[in-house]
Amino acid sequence: MSDPAVALVTGAGSGIGRAIARRLADEYAVVVNDVDAEAATETAVEIEQDGGDATAIEADVADHDAVDDLVDRTLDAYGRIDLLVNNAGIETVYPFTDLPEAEWDRVHDVNLKGQFLLSQRVANEMIDRDVAGDIVNVSSVHDVLPRTEKIHYDTAKAGVLMLTKDMALELAEHGISVNCVAPGAIETPMNAELLDDPDEIERMNERIPWGRMGKPEEIADAVAFLASQDATYVTGSRLCVDGGLSLDP
Ligand code: NAD
């Protein structure tokens, strides 16, 4: 039997990333990255309890040296990377006029620079090993939809969309596909405050044509599709998974 393909999923200790790692474990050996080591280990243990192959590796995707170490350790363990899912992200709330410069930098470093750093290193490893792999970035409906108090997050996600398209152009000659998934409002710890308040949930549900928030597994299905043999002619695309939220903002 040949070795399984290898997927590296960032921010996979919680929410969407955990669901992606678990979904991919049906077909891939999965490297479960998170800046929170304990959370990453929990996901890896869940995968192994289900009979999958997973390795937890702690790293901050915004730190160049940590990203190199993450990729080195992945290659030491598995010898190749077939799929990179750039999912790690953080979100904070500040009115534009009060947004501290350091907060702008922090959110851009994790949400955008982290995707650049990891994609660049992994793409080079794929090219060196002749792996016609896949990269899937997790963006947000707010990569194109404006709103208040999240200008640092939304501009970083807008950057993710362009990163996806430009990388897709440059990596096409190597057979590496690059796509992004743009989630709407998903039930994860990132939305913990909203999920704790039934009135807020109802207000949100009223805004969504589908009438409910999304589940992390529904984003994981979209990522799995983009990396699958059902999407062999898809690159540079943005797959919006939002129950219609962005149709009538
Ligand atoms: P979450 O907070 O549940 O999980 C994010 C994970 O990323 C956490 O485990 C966290 O420890 C990890 N992380 C944070 N900074 C990191 C870093 N520097 N390096 C490595 N890991 C780091 O959030 P989520 O809702 O699962 O979000 C996952 C992705 O989906 C994010 O990119 C987010 O922007 C995006 N997204 C989420 C929603 C939503 O409604 N939940 C909507 C649109 C987009």
Image (cartoon, rainbow, N blue to C red):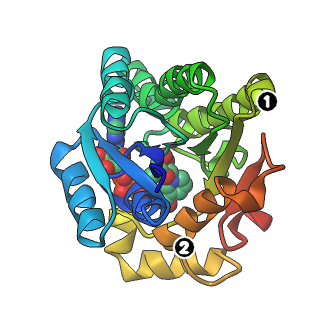
Image: 77 above or below 11: above
Residue 9 x/y as whole percent? 43, 46
For label 2, being within 8 Å of ligand 1 is answered yes
Q: Quadrant of the C terminus?
A: bottom right
Instruction: Specify the amino acid type for callout 2.
Output: Gly
- Secondary structure of the residue carrying numbered label 1: helix
> What residue do we see at 43% from left, 39% from top?
94
Residue annotated with mark 1: 172
Residue sticking out furthest to the right: 233
Image quarter for residue 132?
A: top right
- Classify residue 182 as left or right of residue 230: left
> What residue do we see at 73% from left, 71% from top?
244
Image: 151 above or below 114: below
Residue sticking out furthest to the top: 65
Residue annotated with mark 2: 214
Image: 8 above or below 192: above
Q: Nearer the viewer, residue 76 or 70?
A: 76
Q: Nearer the viewer, residue 14 or 136?
A: 136
Instruction: Specify the amino acid type for callout 1.
Output: Ala
Q: CA distance from mark 1 to mark 2?
A: 32 Å
